[in-house]
Image (spheres, rainbow, N blue to C red):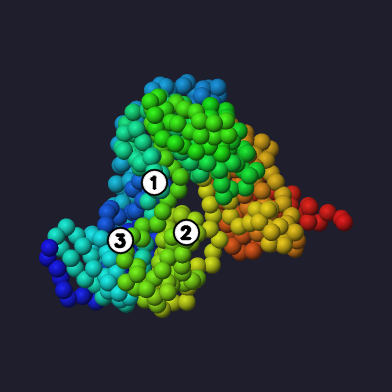
Amino acid sequence: MVVGEIARPVDVLVVGGGPGGYTAAARAAELGREVVLVEAGRLGGVCLNVGCIPSKSLITLAEHRHRGHLMAERGLPLPSEEVDLAAAVRAKDGVVDGLVAGVEALLAKVEVVHGVARLLDDRRVSVESDDLVSHFQFGTCILATGSRPVVIPGLEPDGDRVLDSTGALDLTELPATMAVVGGGYIGLELGTAFAKLGTRVTVVEALDRIGAGFDAELVDVVRGRLDALGVEVLTSTRARGPVDGGLEVEGPDGVAVVPAERVLVAVGRVPNTEELQLENAGIVLEAGRIPVDAQQRTSSKRILAIGDLVPGPALAHKAATEGRVAAEVACGLDAAMEAHVPAIAFTDPEMAAVGLDEAAAREAGLAPIAGRARFRASGRARTLGAEEGFVKVVADAAGTVVGVQIVGPDASDLISAGALAVECALHLDDVVGTIHPHPTLGESLHEAATAALRRLRRPA
């Protein structure tokens, strides 16, 4: 092994090239700093290469196939029922390649070093690549190494029978049956997609409900669609392991075997901290994550951490926002992570939420007022044949918007308007006084706010 013993000085060292890392690196370079980004794999991280983008490619394919039946009823002849999953994988890979090239262009002013970074102390790292080890001495280091799927003993991915989300997205043949272990947003997204493509899907969830983290009212709508798609949902049930003909599970009624040509394990993610040697910099994990302040600073003043390494939801847009904050802090600006983080799930229908739901608002002592608008009353939703679900706007007793929850068509896009309302602490009057064009899905946000405003001003 060749070792570079002299540590090269650099202003900002970013470890990890996912959404958080490449955003941080690009922003620090934009602010005039010398930036080195260390990435052990491919730029773009999990989200771009094997997560958010590839999964949406599969979900979109499945949705188009599924909605073909509706379009046939509306005058458009039904296309071939066959699904060429190998072609879909090639198309997905093309999309990913194009976006990775975009990230590379974004980092034109950043030096990218491929290898595994390890902290030597609170101001130096070693970077190992093949047979070469080099050293860097940083002014500020931003840790952004992301996360990986949780592995369940007895259900370790083998690339054949048992798959994680990465393996599922690379399938070139559609399985006749699939058991999805995990009823969180990843399991529900992929399980729904495979069901729409023609696979018989069973979702196995250890908790007493699916969609944990989302308002139960939203999840109820999704659960109804899963039933309509023929997806069997087993709650309070644990997966024991693959057996001949399926997956052995244990639930309230005892041990059973569910049909599963393939088993997809999607039970969460764990931060990638092992290789970092955090102890050399005096950083101690709390509940498996790196504690940080609002400026993303760790207990070591020169080291910041973002994304899946730190507390909060493991979401790409959260990581990217934290990356921008960390870069600006590293460059001496007064930045802080204070924004509300929207959560979305590309289920059927989609779920999205930002701020407080009614239960959380009550726990906070806000005496919430909520207004709902159902998509079945929306002309645009009706023309789309997607009238299931609703928009809910939650305000405090003074009428300030504190939360928005949506389940329905394009909820993942509509929530941005809700996030703006919550972030800017808009009053219900502000939302109601804003003209929403007709006929659009966005009108439902206006109608929900109007319903809440009527409740607010109802005579005592």
Say which amino acid is labelled 3. Glu
Q: Quadrant of the C terminus?
A: bottom right
Task: Label 2, secondary structure: give it.
Answer: helix
Quadrant, the N terminus? bottom left
Q: Earlier in the sequence, mark 3 or mark 2?
A: 3
Q: Please report contact status of discs 1 and 3: CB closer than 8 Å, yes or no.
A: no
Alpha carbon separation for disc pair 1 and 3? 18 Å
Q: Which residue is found at the position 63% from the left and 56% from the top?
A: 356
How many labels, in total? 3
Mark 2 Cα shell of 10 Å, populated few (<14), some (14-19), many (≥20): many
Viewer can see residue 89? no
Crowd class of label 3 (few under 14; some 14 to 19; many from 20; radius 10 Å)? few
Q: Earlier in the sequence, mark 2 or mark 1?
A: 1
Q: Can you tell which mark lies on residue 151? A: 1
Res 351 quadrant in image: top right
Q: Position of residue 75 (x, y in %)?
A: 53, 22
- Say which label, 1 or 3, has the lower sequence index: 1
29 displayed left or right of 289: left
Q: Nearer the viewer, mark 2 or mark 1?
A: 1
Tell me: 152 left or right of 118. right
Label 3 vs label 2: CA separation? 23 Å
Amino acid type of the residue that numbered disc 1 sits on in the rendered structure: Val
Residue ID for mark 3: 275
Q: Amino acid at mark 2?
A: Lys
* Distance between mark 2 and mark 1 Cα atoms: 24 Å
Q: Which residue is mark 2?
A: 318
